[in-house]
Every structure is written in structure tokens, then in C-alpha cells.
Image (spheres, rainbow, N blue to C red):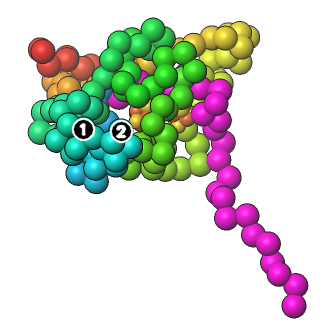
Amino acid sequence: MGKTIKDDQPRVYFDCAKCPGYCCSIYERVPVTKRDINRLAKHFGVSYETAYRRYTTNWRKERVLKRTPDPVLGESCQFLDPVKRNCTIYLARPAVCREYPDRARCVYYDMIQFERRLQDDVNALPLVQITFRKTKKREGADTASGERVWEWTPEKK
Ligand code: SF4
Ligand code: SF4
């Protein structure tokens, strides 16, 4: 009987090689578990305690990867190569990075492609920052259209 060859890889509509690494830059936090820190420790040949102290930090009640200034997007995960725009610890990256974006499309890839087409500029680079600060929400309405709009007052740092 003939063998059915299946392509188990799900089809995706983004190409990380053509992206400046938004997901490694725009999120203020990349959470890590004990298992992630163990993986980092093994990768760098250091103890769990050293990896914990050297590569991670507290963000509110979470333990997250440390960040560093980034020449393109302002700030990024310390493991993003600032020039090649790829992960320098790919095989040791945390679970959350392995799962991302966990769907066939990546909104940031769509956004960069959208802007490049819109601007007719293959080098256009939209700058994005996602924050998780609490905001005071105010609901209002656009006076001209009656459309509901939202206003956000950022929490003071
Ligand atoms: S933002 Fe999307 S396309 Fe860009 S590196 Fe991350 S997963 Fe890949
Ligand atoms: S560990 Fe790698 S994949 Fe994860 S945020 Fe940092 S650079 Fe990106």
C-alpha cells in the first residue's frame, strides 16, 4: 500500500526573516518559568541562580527576561541581535517565544507589509510599543458621527 505523505507543518502567513523582531521588542515583558531559566542555565553553562540573576528580572509579580536599548525599536529583549534582528538563543528561548504568535498570521508582519504597500516603500518601518500599564478608561462619542470612541489616560509611572 502506498504511503501517504503529509505535510504536518501548518501553513503560516508571516516570515520572521523579513521582520525587525517586533515580538522581541515591543512587549515590555517576556515571562519566564523555572523550566525556561533552567534551559537558559544549561545553554550558558551556568547555575540556575546565576541565570536567574543574570538574564531575568522582576516585572511586577512576574519573572521576565531582561531588556536592553535597541537601535531600531527603542528597547528589546537582551537576546535579540540588534543588527541581524534574530534570536541569539533560539534553541534556548523561553516557551512563550516558542509559542508566539500561536496562529497562522502575525499581526505585526501584516502591519509592516500593509505599511510598506501603503507608503510604496519597501523599507518603511512602523514603530510600535505595547504596554501593560493600567489606564483609566473613558467612553465618549465622536460628535460628528456619533460613533463610540475610547479615551485612555495612562497610569502615572
Ligand atoms: S513579530 Fe511576527 S513576523 Fe516578526 S519576528 Fe515576531 S513572530 Fe515573526
Ligand atoms: S528570547 Fe529570543 S525569541 Fe524570545 S524575546 Fe528574546 S530574542 Fe525574542
Quarter of the picture containing the N terminus is bottom right
Rendered location of residue 68, percent (x, y): 33, 17
Quarter of the picture containing the C terminus is top left
Q: Which residue is mark 1?
A: 51
- The kind of residue on which mark 2 rests is Phe
Q: Which residues are magenta?
A: 1-27
To which quarter of the image does residue 31 belong?
A: top left
Depth check: 109 or 43 in front? 43
Please tell me how many numbered marks the rendered image carries: 2
Give the label on residue 131, or none: none
Rendered location of residue 16, percent (x, y): 60, 33
Depth check: 27 or 149 in front? 27
Q: Residue at x 38, y 50 (%)?
A: 95
Rendered location of residue 81, percent (x, y): 49, 22
Q: CA distance from mark 2 to mark 1?
A: 8 Å
Q: Residue at x 35, y 38 (%)?
A: 44
Secondary structure that dominates the magenta span: loop
- The kind of residue on which mark 1 rests is Ala
Q: Which residue is mark 2?
A: 44
- Ligand 1 position by quadrant: top right
Q: Residue at x 49, y 32 (%)?
A: 87
Tag 1 secondary structure: helix
| Badge 1 density bin: few <14, some 14–19, many ≥20, Cα 10 Å | many
To which quarter of the image does residue 75 belong?
A: top left
Q: Is residue 9 magenta?
A: yes
